[in-house]
Amino acid sequence: MQKQLKIKIARPFLPLINEKKRIKFFYGGRGGGKSYAFADSLLLLGLQKKLLVACLREIQESIKDSVHRLLSERISFYGLDEFEVKETEILNRINGTRFIFKGLRSQDIQKIKSLEGVDIAWIEEAQTISKKSWEILAPTIRKDGSEIWISMNRIEENDPLWILLAAHPDERTLVCRVNYNDNPFCPDELKKQALACRQKSPSDYAHIWEGEPLRQGDYKLIDAHKVRLAMSPKIKECSSPLVIGLDVARFGDDSSVFCFRRGRLCFKLEVYDKKDTVELANIATNIIGTHKPQRIFLDAGGVGGGVYDILRDRGFKEVVKAVNFGAKAINDERYGNKRAEMWDMLREWFNEDVELISNERLYNELCAVNKKYDHQGRLLLEEKEEIKKRLGHSTDLADALALTFAEPVYDRGRIQLYGNGKVIIEDMFCEHRQNKSGW
Ligand SMILES: Nc1ncnc2c1ncn2[C@@H]1O[C@H](COP(=O)(O)OP(=O)(O)OP(=O)(O)O)[C@@H](O)[C@H]1O
Ligand SMILES: [Mg+2]
């Protein structure tokens, strides 16, 4: 009994333990205390009587994806030694309460039957649950008095579970919004992050921290009007270092694109179709010799990796940098991957007085990309394949431009370092012309 008294459930979540409802639907922004309160409430109820608790999510590739860890941490925090934490389940040795962990998408009919005796099903990160998963699950949780607890951070107006359960709740459904400012345990650090976000971007704040879904117009990453404005001539010359983005075609019908940018001025696109890795490396070599860029950022996923290897082998490793769109971002608290980070830098670039080469295909590509957020509220972009279906082609030109934002590039003076880092570019090309290597 003493131990149960130690578990304090924050006020907004008291209905979890005090009310009888078929569905308890809690939604809100980051840091609302949902995960902790659900875990604590389930442990409390699981101390009071024997329960079978299923902790569910759409995809659970390993137990690490589940709330197993959070429950274990809360068990140690409260010193609840009647709970035995096993690798894939948690058991109350005294009264037989059991927590099991499952991903819904991977369930076949046989496995889902094991959920028939469940007293409480907790669906965490419910924004990702599909209508199909719900339709299989709902009739399976069929024990008299059983409850389904849902915690979600809304993504868009029509998240399936929102539409099915919360948009027009019936009398057996409790719908509650809880945000970080309702959470008495919210760490100061999170509050600071929320305030900083509110100052920087009210619409991101409303979505990430206040639990609002993204509005229709908010899906687009880049403002079409700003792209149009940028496509009118205004800058004669720019002395910032030359940075080139090279997006290498992944499939037969995609193009390889070099995009040239100096600071606020993006002045040139070179588009090549159907080139193999050696041909592209040769074109890049010529561009290096002629334009002497400070950096070429090259998409090294797929075929691009081969082009990078050749250029590195030719001594250009100081100037050519491989970028992997799926890799970790420099600021990985804010961005789900490198691709999202580069594109967001590009979006911010349009807030300056910039000039972009006028090109309708580039315009369409830039305006086509939708944004989304991962479970941690980090920015992600819509899948390339999705955009391609809508546009009819890949975002090759825009990706090449986005690549120029892979890392900040500083002007290092007139001498460009190539080769092993000690050779100036004129030496490299001069030497090769003399020995007629035939690039
Ligand atoms: N009962 C509690 N005791 C101590 N700290 C708590 C408690 N509940 C919440 N917190 C603190 O508040 C933070 C946010 O809570 P939680 O992760 O449960 O929020 P959430 O609504 O699930 O948000 P997210 O969308 O970020 O997952 C936790 O990281 C923790 O620091
Ligand atoms: Mg959570």
Image (cartoon, grey):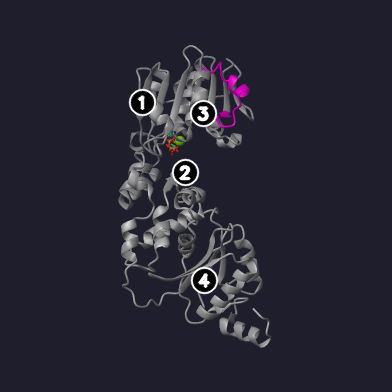
Say which mark, if any, is on residue 185.
Answer: none
Please, which residue is most extreme toward the bottom here? 434
Mark 1 / mark 2, whichever is N-terminal: 1
Q: Secondary structure at mark 4?
A: strand
Please name the amino acid that badge 4 sits on.
Arg
**Disc 2 designates what residue?**
374
Label 1: how many Cα within 10 Å (few below 14, some 14–19, many 20+): some
Between the C-alphas of marks 1 and 4, the distance is 53 Å
Q: Main secondary structure of the magenta part?
A: loop
* Image quadrant, ligand 2: top left
Say which mark, if any, is on residue 175.
Answer: 1
Say which mark, if any, is on residue 295.
Answer: 4
Mark 3 / mark 4, whichever is N-terminal: 3
Q: Which residues are magenta?
A: 102-119
Q: Secondary structure at mark 3?
A: helix
Label 3: how many Cα within 10 Å (few below 14, some 14–19, many 20+): some
